[in-house]
Image (cartoon, rainbow, N blue to C red):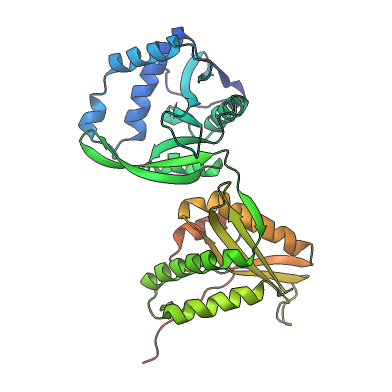
Amino acid sequence: MMSKITKVHVDKIIIRTSTLSDANEVAEIHVKSWQQSYRSIIDEHYLENISFNDRLELRSKILQSNDSNQIHLVAVYDGKIIGFCDAGPAFDNNANYRGEIYAIYLLEEFKKMGIGQQLLQVVHEFLAQKKLLPYVARVLKANHSACAFYQKNGGIVFGEKIEEIGGKSCTEVAYIFGNSINIHTSQLSDIDTMVSLSKAKRLSYEKAQPQFWRYAGEEGDNTQRQWFKQLLEDKNHVMFTAESDTQEILGFIIGRLMPAPEVYNPGGLTLMIDDFCVTSENLWQSVGASLIEETKAAAKSRGATQILVVCGAADHSKRKFLSDQNLSIASEWFVGGIV
């Protein structure tokens, strides 16, 4: 394996097709990357006893298969393999996707440098050429850095299942790629789902601040439903809905165009966004980003110069997303009962 790296020149990374002569190095990386990535997630004894010989035998079989519908890549730095990726047709028969990333691993010291993204890009182009879109990638939910990597690169959470690894039950998340996010102006048929998403958000907020966010029951839901319907015709509001290719609603956003109070002069109208929901917190970086960009573009064309987004104090995933959008906190509300 490589000696300790002090500085990596990313421009010297080479992505190439793997050959049978790579089997030994790839098997070593497979073992080491598991031990690095899954420390504290999978049983330590299990990780320490992963068999190199088993991984070498598996890798040799993979590279000898010569399946033209599969791709096997390695990332090379300074003449040494530092990561690998395998992909091809999906292992299971699912109408929602055709391809699958079987494995993608990098040594710890080479992560967060864009190398994984390079591997993913080559794989995406290959799967598209082979007409294997959409495709899925699976990762343990507790592997937060890997989940963030897939979300950043457009993966949408497709489902979860429990896997037994080393005698421990682990939740595995499937991310789907190549299944485009479709944004359209909200319409009447979207309203019921929008109200349901908004209700789910408020109920989660109620746990953090039970007085301010106290649920008003079905009467409140009906009032919001009528309000949303009215906003569809309001020229001072912009409303967008995100759907998957299978027409599943993934989220929505409502923005109001309004002047700032007279004591402030931001240079134009303010786009205020209050109702902004996605079906899963893992979708903020993909669906959330698409929705907010569409809304900003519509607002800018109508004279808006700044954006204001309301967010619950305990909604950590949404707050992180908004921060990643280069938005900063301008004001906060402090609430409490009067006794």
Q: Residue 232: x and y, percent?
A: 67, 71
User: Residue 26 versus residue 107: which sits nearer the camera?
Assistant: 26
Whether residue 325 can be seen here:
no
Q: Is residue 30 above or below residue 334?
A: above
- Which quadrant would residue 27 be assigned to in this image? top left
User: Residue 294 versus residue 222: which sits nearer the camera?
Assistant: 222
User: Residue 71 versus residue 12: which sits nearer the camera?
Assistant: 71
Q: Could you tell whether 117 is left or right of 239 in the image?
A: left
Q: Residue 83: x and y, percent?
A: 47, 23
Q: Residue 287: x and y, percent?
A: 57, 52
Position of the C terminus, as image quadrant, is: bottom left
Q: Is residue 47 above or below residue 288?
A: above
Position of the N terminus, as image quadrant, is: top left
Count of labels shown? 0
Residue at image point 47% right, 51% down: 282
Q: Residue 225: x and y, percent?
A: 55, 75
Whether residue 235 can be seen here:
yes
Residue at image point 55% right, 47% down: 246
User: Residue 192 versus residue 18: which sits nearer the camera?
Assistant: 192
